[in-house]
Image (cartoon, helix red, strand yellow):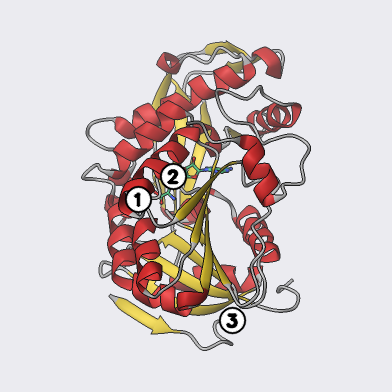
Amino acid sequence: MSRRAIPEKTPAGGEPRVEAWRQLLGVRSERPSPLLASVPADEAALHELRERLARTPRELPSKYFYDDRGSALFEQITRLPEYYPTRTEEALLRAVAPEIAEACGGAQLSDVVELGSGAASKTVALLEAALALGAAPRYVAVDISAHALRRTRALLAQAAPQVAVQEVLADYTRALSLPSRLAQSRRLALFLGGTIGNDEDEDALALLARIREQLDPGDSFLLGANLVCEPAAIHAAYNDAQGVTAQFNFNILAAVNRLAQSRFDPRDFDHHAPYVVEHKRIEMWLVANRAVEIELGRLGASLKLAKGEGIRTEISRRFTRADVLQLLDAAGFSPDRWFESPNSRFGLGLGKARAGPRTP
Ligand SMILES: C[S@@+](CC[C@H](N)C(=O)[O-])C[C@H]1O[C@@H](n2cnc3c(N)ncnc32)[C@H](O)[C@@H]1O
């Protein structure tokens, strides 16, 4: 385990209730964010889908992986022998949770807010560490997946029943508003699981800067990132022998079909997930295994794909320690601590919200 304190100036630089969370978080949008499978598609979601499918290369937003089935498949992925990120991050977090809880205010820690919380299985360690220091934190889980939020509720009811849990069904790429802190208290925002790697630099920075805007100086932010490591290990994690990741990839088409009333057929596609060394990232693709014309329903017209043509469904970037700390710094956080797994495959960067404008 490598833990390094970083001086302030380095480096360079039931169903979750939508109304309840809107009231709690004061979300500014008029409408709740789209809940896959149970909230009707709104125009913004359709517009985004259209725009992403028209790009070169064609894309689908990876958030659409996480309908009920996709979330269940993702949980299955996290337990696969090839998928090292979850167990690596979890072991790291367990080992350093007391130090993180102390650094984030100890007994004063009042809110732990997690974006893209999933089943929140690894967050339990952090909440337990805060409780041990005398804190009574509220846990706010923000996720686009109702399935994930149900799992969170069940898990925390069992593992940490003292913690008040608030589930927020929301798309964090849209309105984002965190609970305000009480005087003398501290908040900690979490973005774990390497999910930051699903965005290109510009979008990743914009998201972190929006999180920073919601925090006060002195609040903390913990960012989990997959690190650059052996390409074969990374490749295997997205190309498992049981084909669960392939099923997860195909499943995005079912979610898109529901949203857009389109007619993508997963049987027309192959799962393809190379590690692109040059870009330090996995790219997940659905590649047409024959020439197809797909009716796009509410997206309009149809989409023709030649055999071998692909749609990119996800990027999953690998970072260096310097990349993570620079990202934190640029978003307005003073890098405070760095924790790295013994195999150097996963890192956790802890930042403190800085007063003043962020780095341009
Ligand atoms: C890679 S999983 C990580 C889950 C969990 N944090 C972990 O470490 O195991 C990404 C999670 O983010 C959620 N998610 C993805 N895009 C989202 C969005 N735009 N808004 C809210 N949640 C999102 C997914 O539903 C999923 O639970």
Which residue is pictured at 40% across the width and 14% down the height? 267
Whole-Å distance between the Cαs marked 2 and 1?
8 Å
- 247 versus 276 height, above or below: above
Q: Tell which circle, 2 or 3, labels the residue nearer the N-terminal end.
A: 3
Q: Could you say which quadrant of the image residue 346 lies in? A: bottom left
> Closest to the observer: 189 or 50?
189
Q: Could you say which quadrant of the image residue 269 lies in? A: top left
Mark 2 and ligand 1: say if the CB distance to the nearest ligand atom is below 8 Å. yes
Which of discs 3 and 1 lies nearer the camera? The answer is 1
Label 1 is placed on what type of residue?
A: Ser
Mark 3 and ligand 1: say if the CB distance to the nearest ligand atom is below 8 Å. no
Q: Report which residue position mark 1 lands on.
A: 121
Callout 1: SS: loop
> Closest to the observer: 202 or 137?
137
- 319 versus 194 height, above or below: below
The reply to whether dot 2 and dot 1 touch (C-beta < 8 Å) is yes
Which residue is pictured at 62% across the width and 61% down the height? 208
Classed neighbour count for the residue bearing mark 2: other residues with Cα under 10 Å, few (<14), some (14–19), many (≥20): many
Q: Report which residue position mark 3 lands on.
A: 12
Q: Tell which circle, 3 or 1, labels the residue nearer the N-terminal end.
A: 3
Where residue 285 appears, as percent x and y from the top left, is: 46, 33
Classed neighbour count for the residue bearing mark 3: other residues with Cα under 10 Å, few (<14), some (14–19), many (≥20): few
Callout 2: SS: loop
Where residue 72 appears, as percent x and y from the top left, is: 37, 32
Mark 1 and ligand 1: say if the CB distance to the nearest ligand atom is below 8 Å. yes
Label 3 is placed on what type of residue?
A: Ala
Using the image, tell me which numbered label, if any, was put on residue 118.
2
Where residue 138 appears, as percent x and y from the top left, is: 51, 59
Q: Give the position of the C terminus as an image quadrant.
A: bottom right
